[in-house]
Amino acid sequence: MAELENEQINELHTLIVRTYNLREMKELCQQMGVNWEDVSAETTVPEFGRELVKYFERRGRLFELRDQVWYERSTVIQNYGLVEPITHNDDQDTYVSSPTSGGHIGCWVGGVIFVIVLALFWYGYSDAQKQLELRDSEAFVIGYFSLQDNINCRDAWERLSGDYRVNKHSTGLTPYCQYWNSFRKVEILKLEVLDETDTTASVEVVLALTNFDNTVANQRITYSLTRLAGTDPWIIADSNP
């Protein structure tokens, strides 16, 4: 049975680390019938995501992992214009877009569908990967809230500009951490890049903040990001509110 190409594996890893936080990746392992402790002891999203992909690659289950990610993150993926993933037919040991029947005619139709869907999937996924790379301000905001959801507020604090800390969090790091640690879960419901250049970006995000009593409050924030050059990391310069 054919496996994913190296470029597709890299794209799968990118998709996982940009749409899952650490806790959600561990839950993904459980959904796949895997003990996350057997996958990796890494505590950062990129490293755990890399080990997760390698774990399933070693066991020949990359297609299963990819299909599960597509299923769980279908809304995010559709926002990038991706086509539906091809699925595996265990009886024929080939990949088609949907089950086929009817003897030789069914096999012929299935073969044609296979070629078409495979081509659409390959080029569509490549185009989406380019969008992911271009819209790295979106990835930055996803990573920022992934830190908050995993109680890594000190690392998140480092992603704030000095002026932003003074203007928005003048009481310092401790109250900042206390605020974010007061939530059991921090989840992004919607994220949209309003504007992006090489050095500035404006990103709107809608959050679902779950308290420890399981009450949920939604919050809409527009972040202004900045960096010195296109290859530098983003930092948060301002937010509204």
Image (cartoon, rainbow, N blue to C red):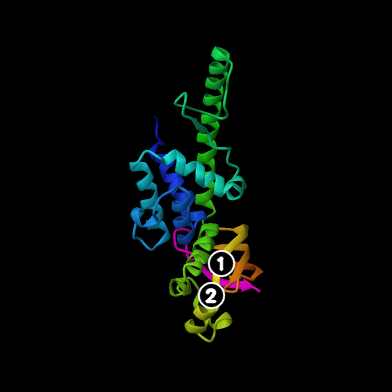
**Residue kind at label 2, given as amino acid type:** Trp
**Residue kind at label 1, given as amino acid type:** Val
Residue 228 within the segment the image draws in magenta: yes
In this picture, which residue range is highlighted in magenta? 226-241
Residues at marks 2 and 1 touching, judged by CB atoms closer than 8 Å? yes
Pointer 1: residues within 10 angstroms few (<14), some, or many (20+)?
Answer: many
Specify the label residue 186 is tagged with: 1
In the rendered view, would you say 119 is above or below 218?
A: above
Q: Which of 208 and 15 is in front in this view?
A: 208
| Residue located farthest toward the top when viewing the structure as drawn | 104
Q: Where is residue 104 in the image (x, y as percent from the top left)?
A: 54, 12
In the rendered view, would you say 205 is above or below 175?
A: above
Q: Quadrant of the N terminus?
A: top left
Q: Where is residue 87 in the image (x, y as percent from the top left)?
A: 52, 33
SS for dot 1: strand
Specify the label residue 88 is tagged with: none
Residue at 58 percent across and 58 percent down: it is 196
Residue 112 within the segment the image draws in magenta: no
Pointer 2: residues within 10 angstroms few (<14), some, or many (20+)?
Answer: many
Q: Quadrant of the C terminus?
A: bottom right
Q: Disc 2 designates what residue?
A: 180
Q: Distance between the residues labelled 2 and 1?
A: 8 Å
